Amino acid sequence: MKPSFAAGVRQKVEISSIIAITGDVNYSYVYLANGQCQFHSRTLKWLQDRYPSLLRIHKSYLINLNHVTHYSLSRGRSPHGYVVMENDLKLSVSRRNVELVRELLNKTPGRAQLISVN
C-alpha cells in the first residue's frame, strides 16, 4: 500500500482499489472501488508520478485499466472516445491518446467491452 494524503490525514490506498483520478487545477478526486471518493490537494501530475501504473487518458483523467468496463473509440480525422469505469464514471479520451488507449485495452485481458468503433 502507498500512503495517500487527504486534508492533512495520511491514508493508505492500494493501487488496485483506485478506479480513476480526476483533476481540477491543483486538486484531485480519487475514486475508489469501495465507493469512496477522496479529495486531495495534489495535482494530477504529482499523482501520475506517484502511481505510474495508472494511465493518463486526458489532461484531467488518470485511470486504472483493470476497472474499465466499456469503451468507445473512433478513428478518422477527428479521433475521439470515452471509457466507462466500474462505478459508471464516463471519462473522455483525448484525441492524442485514442490509439494508445485502444492498444492497451486490447492487450488487457478480460473485462473491457468495446461498445462501438468508427
Image (tube, helix red, strand yellow):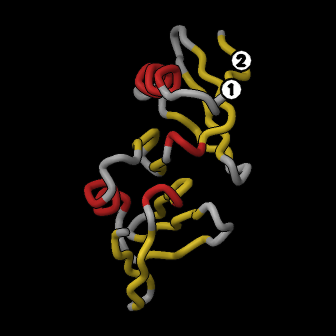
Q: Secondary structure at mark 1?
A: strand
Residue 40 x %, y %:
44, 75
73 displayed left or right of 54: right
Asked if 108 appears above or below 85 in the picture, the reply is: above
Residue visible at 53% across and 54% down in the picture = 20
Question: Who is closer to the viewer here, 8 or 110?
Answer: 110
Question: Who is closer to the viewer here, 75 or 14?
Answer: 14
Asked if 71 appears above or below 46 in the picture, the reply is: above
Residue visible at 61% across and 40% down in the picture = 68
Residue visible at 62% across and 33% down in the picture = 82
Asked if 27 appears above or below 59 in the picture, the reply is: below
Residue 3 x %, y %:
34, 76
Q: Which kind of residue does numbered mark 1 sit on?
A: Gln
Asked if 25 appears above or below 55 in the picture, the reply is: below
46 displayed left or right of 1: left
Determine which residue is flagged by label 2: 116
Determine which residue is flagged by label 1: 113
